[in-house]
Image (cartoon, helix red, strand yellow):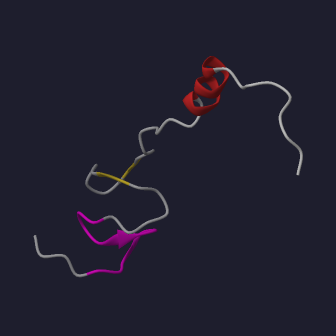
Amino acid sequence: MGQPKRKQSKQRSRKRRGANRFSLPILAKDPTDGSTFRPHRVNPANGMYRGRQVLDVEL
């Protein structure tokens, strides 16, 4: 296996790791009640998915 010719600097390692920071999740807005939820998932507030009721949610 090949070995590196030079030591990798701290700045170079930190630059690479800095690109992998966590970002805030993207949220979609429900057209029926205006609540926010993760896209392509069931809305936990009202149990709707793509305009259909798929979960029974106690309000």
Residue placed at 46% from the left, 39% from the top?
22
The image quarter containing residue 2 is: top right
Q: Nearer the viewer, residue 43 or 7?
A: 7
Residue furthest to the right? 2
Name the spot of residue 14 as percent of width and height, x first: 58, 25
| Residue depicted at 67% across the width and 22% down the height | 12
1 sits left or right of 37 in the view = right
Image quarter of residue 24: top left
**Secondary structure predominantly adopted by residues drawn in magenta:** loop
Residue nearer the viewer, 38 or 2: 2
Q: Is residue 22 above or below residue 57?
A: above
| Drawn side of residue 46 relative to residue 29, left or right | left
* Spot occupied by residue 43 in the image (x, y as percentages of width and height): 33, 64
Q: Residue at x 63, y 28 (%)?
A: 13
Left or right side of 42 for 5: right
Residue placed most toward the observer, 46 or 15? 15
Residue 44: quarter of image: bottom left
Placement of 21 over or under 58, stated as above or below: above
| Residue sitting farthest toward the left | 59
**Which residue is at the front of the view, 36 or 24?**
24
The boundaries of the magenta stretch are: 44-55
Image mark count: 0
- Residue at horizontal 46 percent and vertical 38 percent from the top: 23
Whether the magenta-drawn stretch holds residue 16 is answered as no
**Residue 42, horizontal then vertical, whole percent:** 38, 69
